[in-house]
Amino acid sequence: GENVEQHPSTLSVQEGDSAVIKCTYSDSASNYFPWYKQELGKRPQLIIDIRSNVGEKKDQRIAVTLNKTAKHFSLHITETQPEDSAVYFCAASWTGNQFYFGTGTSLTVIP
Amino acid sequence: EAGVAQSPRYKIIEKRQSVAFWCNPISGHATLYWYQQILGQGPKLLIQFQNNGVVDDSQLPKDRFSAERLKGVDSTLKIQPAKLEDSAVYLCASSPSSYNEQFFGPGTRLTVL
């Protein structure tokens, strides 16, 4: 089956700085890559996703890049704010099925 | 719109007992997922339904876990018998189709003693 690795496991940044979280996947057939944000004690919520026919996608302060050759994708958060503090999970999927999640990155934005 | 509903929210049982969880997805959502999230880890997909058919159950421990989705709406997940390592939050999610955003329920926190 698919194996998704996520790094780093914890990340602290100063407010206003950028944060980058990286994930690698093993199955070249995976073609859908969502990112979820989970605040403490709350349910995961989708923040951005990308499909394999696109190399980059941006939504305001959040962007995701995908390198199919290297089988890795990254989440970029610019101008971080305290409310960005949460656990972020990447996932890989084949045609929207068989979702495999990473182990999560705990992001802390220091005011 | 109403979100994904799950019950119970918390459950404490002893090992070897049985337990069942219930999920009511967002109205009209064809795809339903059950995840197991162990503390400090990412969600692990247990089973995915498309309407009332199973799309993927490759990570479901079928010797003790079972799930059904009758009439393509509500779903139940059962564990029989439970083990200590089953202690986790069980999340249900639904989406209009498999390529769409998944909307998660509040989860059921299971503690097996």
Image: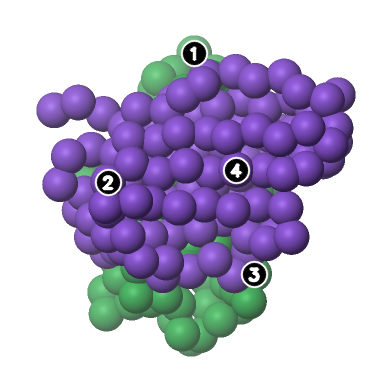
Chain colours: A green, B purple
List x then y, in percent, for residue B87: 75, 33
Q: Nearer the viewer, mark 3 or mark 2?
A: 2
In the displayed structure image, the side of residue A73 where residue B78 appears, left or right = right
Q: Label 1 crowding class (10 Å Cα cut-off): few <14, some 14-19, many 20+?
A: few
Label located before the other in sequence (1 or 3): 3
Chain of the residue where label 3 is placed in the rendered structure: A
Residue drawn at (63%, 64%) of the image: B59
List x then y, in percent, for residue A9: 68, 43
Chain of the residue where label 2 is placed in the rendered structure: B
Q: Residue A3 — which label?
A: 3
**Helix, strand, or loop for circle 2?**
loop
Q: Is the N terminus of chain B in the top left, top right, bottom left or bottom right quadrant? A: top left
**Helix, strand, or loop for circle 4?**
strand
What's under tag 4, amino acid-wise? Lys
**Helix, strand, or loop for circle 3?**
loop
In the displayed structure image, the side of residue B12 where residue B51 appears, left or right = left
Q: Return the residue at label 1.
A: A111
Q: Mark 1 to mark 2: distance in Å?
A: 45 Å
Give yes or no for contact between labels 4 and 1 (Cβ–Cβ under 8 Å). Answer: no
Q: Nearer the viewer, mark 4 or mark 1?
A: 4
